[in-house]
Amino acid sequence: MSTATNKIIINALYDDDDVLLKGVKQVKEQGYAIEEVYTPFPVHGLDHAMGLKRTRIAIAAFLYGILGLATSIAMTYGMMIIDWPMNIGGKPSFTWGENMPAFVPIMFELTVFFAAHLMVWTFFIRNDIYPGRKTQNPDPRTTDDKFLMEVELKGEREVLMNLLKESGAIEISEKSN
Amino acid sequence: MHYEAPVREPLIIGDKSYHDITVDVAKPVETFAPKSWWVVFTLSLIAFLWGVGCILYTIGTGIGVWGLNNTVDWAWDITNFVWWVGIGHAGTLISAVLLLFRQKWRMSINRSAEAMTIFSVIQAALFPGIHMGRIWLAYFVFPIPNQFGSLWVNFNSPLLWDVFAISTYFTVSVVFWYVGLIPDFAMIRDRAIRPVTKHIYRILSFGWGGKAKQWQRFEEVSLVLAGLATPLVLSVHTIVSMDFATSVIPGWHTTIFPPYFVAGAIFSGFAMVQTLLIIVRKMFKMEDYITIQHIEMMNIIIMLTGSIVGIAYITELFIAWYSGVEYEQYAFLNRATGPYWWAYWSMMTCNVFSPQFMWFKKLRTSLVFTFIISIVVNIGMWFERFVIIVTSLHRDYLPSSWSMFSPTFVDIGIFIGTIGFFFVLFLLYARTFPVIAQAELKTILKSSGENYKKLQESNEHGH
């Protein structure tokens, strides 16, 4: 991301998820903007503390599922009713409705297929991750056991530094970019 | 915040920190393989290559090289197919169903169980492919217009449902597995020292950063995928069972097949998970994460599903008698007392009798005993499919065409080959992939780790 040149980011490194969560809350209370938090595992309640909105990816998955269902209906209708109706075992195959029970497995499978795959594609695109992407976390220790909070500097530098130190950060530095 | 009742046994043993989990999980990837790995790998590779030879011979000559005849026209091929698909089911059950039920003990076994799913579905998919005889026409199963004009596939056929079910199941399982792997690949990437290793794991990890929003989406995606995979896994073996159940062969056309097949699939799958994990925990020293408690939990599931399978067998017999259809009655009488009595009773002994030992705590917490039972159960489940397929076919409506099936070396070779291929894939996975979902496991360290539980207990007494 290209941030404005006058924006200064302070990195605070924590070594415990509970301390981090407390730190996030304190920093937020003092009116600072948290740029990003990098954690090695999903920290319960972190999204809430940071004020992140709920993800809408499940809604997207539902819509993809409907698309899959529609595709399966269109496919079975087009192939077996319109294009080449077959009389199999004397069973009616000239209306989709009468044949529908035999298509239920296909309808189900395609619903799941579309919902799962398109949701995962959405997940990749929204997270901006793909094979060969440059590593996103600035500190390699944040996939092991450290937690990194990036705070935008506002007002006195000392005030923020002290706040972070008191909240239990083990390392504080200015982001260089 | 991180509270769990003290009566619950710890799921992570020892004085572990987050960093210890990282080190332990990355170790098999970062160090040389133990000698035992090379021994098992070499044996599996030989078996695999032998299987490749037998498959090439089959494709080159035709399926006449198998032991099939006019009466028994499905035998080991479909037996093996159903067996392998069934084994795969436990992986999805562990990673999806146990996630929906919020069972924390799934976390140290779900990665390997899902790997098992994917590798066994690969083995399964081989068989329908080669049993067509002309594998170069395999694309006929897909809904694409062909050279005869717009002659489409038949969507009324369970065999076609199977194509859709297996391909959806395979691809969704791969995606589910891979999404979970991304943060763990990132962990290995960030620890890697050699540039080549770092580069490979950077590509595999998709550049994952572990941002708060990413984790939020990650958890949501895992939950929705679990919700999708749960009915999916049930549908797969249901549809496999419909390959038989929608036919008119006595012994096949029974309405009990879908639930009975699904229970059997979970039963055999958990047995295979036991076989693999007992090896993995020993070979890579994962005893602190895959504990006796994990083994015990899985044994309880084996006992439960084994009992369901037992009830299904008995129900089948009862319904055959109750139906009043003499062909149906004969099919089941012939299974139990006919020339294939030994297969039927091996199935009964292995699947119904042997899991009942798990009622005893001493036995279900014994590693050696569990390992033996896990093999016995898989032998039993192979016989189940053999009994269903071959004994229902070998004595049909016309006694003049009654016959027996005897496998040729090619039948046996392909089966052994798939076992080899399965282990080759699994052993390669165990050396290059994080075998435990470490990011997930770290979330339960404070509630279910032994040291944290002790700390919590002493704090409670202090108040």
Image: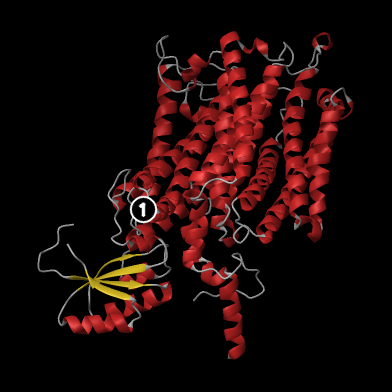
Q: Quick check: B284 above or below B448?
A: above
Q: Which sits in the foreground, B378 or A145?
A: A145
Question: In the rendered image of this protein, does residue B281 appear above or below residue B352?
Answer: below
Q: Dot 1: what SS?
A: helix
Tell whether B310 sits left or right of B428. right
Q: Position of residue A123 (x, y in %)?
A: 35, 49
The residue that appears at 58% across and 42% down in the rendered structure is B116
Q: Can residue A56 be spotted in the picture?
A: yes
Q: Nearer the viewer, residue B320 or B424?
A: B424
Question: Badge 1: few (under 14), some or many (20 or more) residues near its Cα, within 10 Å?
Answer: some
Q: Position of residue B320 (x, y in %)?
A: 82, 32
Snapshot colouring: secondary structure
Q: Position of residue B172 (x, y in %)?
A: 47, 41
When asked about the image quadrant of residue A171, the answer is: bottom left
User: What residue is disc 1 on?
Assistant: A57
Give the residue displayed 67% in from the left and 50% down from the top.
Answer: B278
In the image, residue B152 above or below residue A74: above
Q: What amino acid does circle 1 point to?
A: Ile
Residue at the spot 77% in from the left edge and 17% down from the top edge: B405
Residue nearest the viewer, comparing B375 with B38: B38
Instruction: Read off the chain for label 1.
Output: A
Q: Nearer the viewer, residue B265 or B373?
A: B373
In the picture, measured across the screen, residue B178 lies left or right of residue B87, that is left
Left or right, B379 with respect to B463, comes to right
Q: Quadrant of the image for the C terminus of chain B?
A: bottom right
Q: Position of residue A168 (x, y in %)?
A: 35, 80
